[in-house]
């Protein structure tokens, strides 16, 4: 009987050791999976930082390109204002002054601006709530 007890005790000890080895193996797998997840997260963060840096570089390049298109002096290409005969407005220097009469005015600019950046200022005075619009073609 003592032999049976010893044998049973050995089996219990062996089962406990197997259980401990299985738990340790599971823990190692869990740790490996966590390390893999963290590595993937670091890769995603690096890719995000790279994309962000590329976006900043692209925006800076675009701003440089746009800045290069803007003339150094706003008066470097003064436009001649053309007003059709019979129009109620008048030209004063580089300004078109619309009459107080209710009528449409069509003005054109020489030379025609077909590329680059142009500055166009409009000031409305005394329109007394009247609706108005600008149309650029």
Image (cartoon, grey):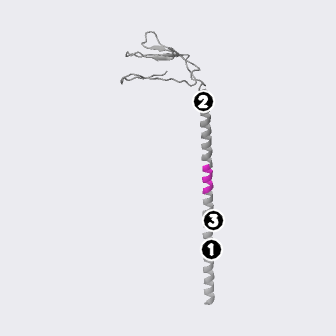
Between discs 3 and 2, the one toward the N terminus: 3
Between discs 1 and 3, the one toward the N terminus: 1
Using the numbered discs, state the Cα–Cα distance from disc 3 to disc 2 in whole angstroms: 58 Å
Q: Measuring 61% from the left and 56% from the top, which residue is drawn there? A: 38
Mark 1 packing: few (<14 Cα in 10 Å), some, or many (20+)?
Answer: few
The disc placed on residue 67 is: 2
Q: Measuring 63% from the left and 65% from the top, which residue is drawn there? A: 28
Instruction: Please state the horizontal and vertical placement of residue 48, each as a whole percent of the image.
Output: 60, 46
Q: Are marks 2 and 1 in contact (CB under 8 Å)?
A: no
Q: Quadrant of residue 65?
A: top right
The disc placed on residue 28 is: 3
Label 3 secondary element:
helix
Foreground of the two, 125 or 114: 125
Magenta segment, prevailing SS (helix, strand or loop): helix
Using the numbered discs, state the Cα–Cα distance from disc 2 to disc 1 in whole angstroms: 73 Å
Q: Is residue 14 magenta?
A: no
Q: Are marks 3 and 2 in contact (CB under 8 Å)?
A: no
Image position of 20 (left or right of 97)? right
> Disc 2 vs disc 1: which is toward the camera?
2
The disc placed on residue 112 is: none
The span picked out in magenta is 37-45
108, above or below 72, in the image: above
Using the numbered discs, state the Cα–Cα distance from disc 1 to disc 3 in whole angstroms: 15 Å
Instruction: Please state the horizontal and vertical placement of residue 26, each as a whole percent of the image.
Output: 60, 66
Instruction: Please state the horizontal and vertical placement of residue 112, each as a whole percent of the image.
Output: 55, 17
Label 1 secondary element:
helix
Label 2 secondary element:
helix
The disc placed on residue 18 is: 1
Foreground of the two, 16 or 42: 42
Between discs 2 and 1, the one toward the N terminus: 1
Q: Are marks 1 and 3 in contact (CB under 8 Å)?
A: no
């Amino acid at each position: 009987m003592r032999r049976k007890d010893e044998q049973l005790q050995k089996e219990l000890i062996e089962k406990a050791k197997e259980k401990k080895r299985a738990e340790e193996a599971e823990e190692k797998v869990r740790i490996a999976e966590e390390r893999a997840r963290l590595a993937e997260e670091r890769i995603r963060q690096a890719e995000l930082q790279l994309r962000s840096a590329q976006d900043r570089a692209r925006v800076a390049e675009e701003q440089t390109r746009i800045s290069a298109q803007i003339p150094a002096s706003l008066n470097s290409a003064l436009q001649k204002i053309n007003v059709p005969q019979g129009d109620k407005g008048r030209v004063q220097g580089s300004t078109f002054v619309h009459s107080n009469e209710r009528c449409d005015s069509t003005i054109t600019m020489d030379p025609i601006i077909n590329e680059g950046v142009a500055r166009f200022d409009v000031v409305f005075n005394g329109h007394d709530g009247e609706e108005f619009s600008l149309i650029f073609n």
